[in-house]
Image (cartoon, rainbow, N blue to C red):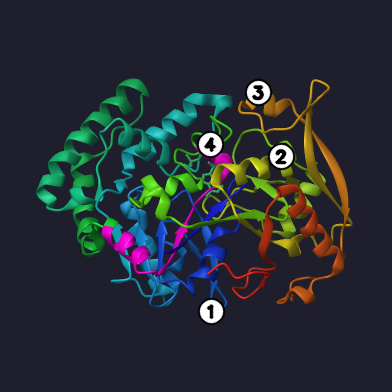
Amino acid sequence: MSGLVVVGTQWGDEGKGKITNYYASRADMVVRFQGGANAGHTVTVDGKKVVFHLLPSGISVRGVKCVIGPGVVVDPFALVEEMDYVRSNGIDVGENLMLDVGTHLVMPYHKAVEEAEEKGRGKHAIGTTRRGIGPAYSDRYSREGLRCGDLIPFDRFRSKLEESAGRKNEILTKLYGAEPLNVSELVESMRDVSERLSPHIADTLNTVRSALAEGQNVLFEGAQGALLDIGFGTYPFVTSSHTTAAGVAPGTGVPPKDIGRVAGVAKAYTTRVGAGPFPTEADPERSKIICDRGAEYGATTGRPRRCGWVDAVALRYAIALSGVERLIITKLDVLDAVETIPVCTGYRVDGRNLSTFPRDVETLERVEPVYEEVQGWMTDTSGARRPDDLPDRAVAYLRRLEELAGVSIAAVSVGAASDAIVEFESLL
Ligand code: IMP
């Protein structure tokens, strides 16, 4: 069996799309197991930037089967739009895409409810991506959701949709004083979308399990990052799914013992989008330098990301949660012009050292990061393709990250281009 899970170890946007896409050329199958159109996975295909939100990043690699597993929540309108978009970029979407029957649907009323909820939170807003993720997962857990398998036959779906949309209109109008959705328009637009998606809908559980049993290379593509995990992230400033490797089993139906190895992706620095504590956030001036050099603007929302330094306390926490065996560091080149690079090695709170990542945001907001300064390399690394191409100081920085993380680094990404990677060890 050769499964490889690729998960984020920070607050998302670590560059998992590019990494998954890189390994996809050696994979037989790529499976998304959680999240939805809140994700924005940017990959470069034939020199062109393509952003995936719902489609697994392996879709651009010919011959790779892509599965959207039952742990994902799918906005069917967004998916159809994305299929058209990737096709217009010369990428084939046909039998290579499977959508599990158990995958929950994000409906326009989920987005409307989220809009109203975020507005209602005022200054305590989470800063969500407004993609309906939280309300769709809420419906799943309160057993009110609609699933891809419900789309067929459409007449049965129609009555389920009318019932759900009717209930949500009550909430929208009576609780939030918002406009109701036009249910018959929604039904009609879903008819078209349903026809487009039907050929891809299948029971994918055996497909994924059989691929593993046959020894095929299966990549499990995570979205967001460990610190946004619903159970272990900086709650409530998190997303609504399990973003750690533990999410693979319920998100695909593969038993934990068969899943395989875990690679954790971390940027050579850290970013965060949306609200919530971020102990190693840089001062606005240095944050802007990283933001500009790293093009740190959300792939889904276009929002500028908050930028800061590597936080080894948070990284060790994420590594332990996912059982990360190897790290992949991305965007090393963004630090090419930083003279000294702060790295947070520990936290202090109330005059005490904290050895573990606090489980409550109130404490996390109060921690003082303890920094060490690592010498920058002040050399362009974007052309590096082999370990020997990297300047000694960049290697020293990576070695220090390995020491602090307790895990070795398998590869380093040095640019957006698909081949801009230095591999120390092959994972697939
Ligand atoms: P939601 O997932 O849209 O509900 O947003 C909840 C939180 O997760 C917000 O802070 C978002 O900015 C953040 N978030 C969701 N998806 C991503 C992502 O793909 N990258 C980075 N942050 C994300």
Q: Earlier in the sequence, mark 1 or mark 4?
A: 1
Position of residue 244 measured from the top left corner of the image (x, y, whole percent):
51, 45
Q: CA distance from mark 1 to mark 3?
A: 46 Å
Q: Amino acid at mark 4?
A: Val
Of marks 2 and 1, the one in the foreground: 2
Task: Count the labels in the image.
Answer: 4
Q: Residue under label 1, please give it.
A: 46
In terms of secondary structure, where does tag 1 sit?
loop
Crowdedness of circle 4 by 10 Å Cα count: few (<14), some, many (20+)? many
Q: Earlier in the sequence, mark 3 or mark 4?
A: 4
Q: Amino acid at mark 2?
A: Val
Q: What number is the disc on residue 16? A: none
Judge whether 145 appears above or below 86 on screen.
Answer: above
Nearest the eye: 132 or 427: 427
Q: Is residue 46 left or right of residue 392?
A: left
Q: Earlier in the sequence, mark 2 or mark 1?
A: 1
Q: Specify the segment rendered in magenta.
A: 206-229
Q: Earlier in the sequence, mark 4 or mark 2?
A: 4
